[in-house]
Amino acid sequence: MPPEAHTLLGADGLPYRSTTPGTLGEHRRGRLYGRLDCPSALRALTRGHYVAHRVFFPDETTAITAGYRPCAVCLPATYTDRQ
């Protein structure tokens, strides 16, 4: 059985397939990135919000290079540092 494929976004903001899952989840419209266990994102997902706009990055450097900013809820220190 082939390994499961995941769709991630690269530093250029374009999707690509990977056998390794992303470490950060993002909201494409808000250009935010955060932890996969972010309470704010999980609440929104539970309500059915932004599922179609959810994207994933392999790491923080890639997310930042692609123009995304950290979530204030799950990454408050990083959010403050980047302001």
Image (cartoon, grey):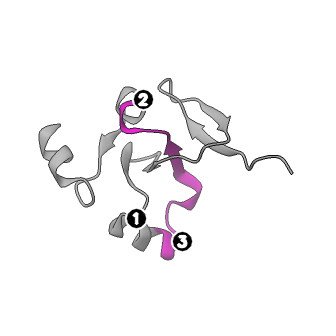
In magenta, the rendered stretch is 45-61
Q: Is residue 55 magenta?
A: yes
Q: Earlier in the sequence, mark 3 or mark 2?
A: 3
Most foreground residue, 20 or 15: 20
Quarter holding residue 36? bottom left
- Pointers 3 and 2 in contact (C-beta within 8 Å): no
Q: Which residue is mark 3?
A: 48
Assign a secondary structure to mark 1. Answer: loop
Q: In the depicted view, which residue is nearer to us: 48 or 82?
A: 82
Q: Which mark is residue 66?
A: 2
Mark 2: secondary structure: loop
| Residue 2 appears left or right of 44 | right
Question: Of circles 3 and 1, which is in front?
Answer: 1
| Residue, far front | 1
| Residue 2 falls within the magenta-colored stretch | no
Judged left or right of residue 72, residue 5 is: right
* Mark 1 neighbour density, 10 Å: few (under 14) some (14–19) many (20 or more): few
Q: Is residue 83 visible?
A: no
| Disc sitting over residue 37 in the figure | 1
Q: Position of residue 68 (x, y in %)?
A: 36, 37
Of callouts 2 and 1, the N-terminal one: 1
Disc 1 residue type (three-letter): Asp
Q: Please tell me which of labels 3 and 1 falls first in the chain.
A: 1
Identify the residue at image location x=51%, y=29%. Answer: 13
Q: Amino acid at mark 2?
A: Ala
Q: Is residue 3 left or right of residue 7?
A: right
Residue located farthest toward the right when viewing the structure as drawn: 1
Q: Quadrant of residue 69?
A: top left
Which of pointers 2 and 1 indicates the residue nearer the eye? 1
**Residue occupying image coordinates x 83% and y 46%:** 2
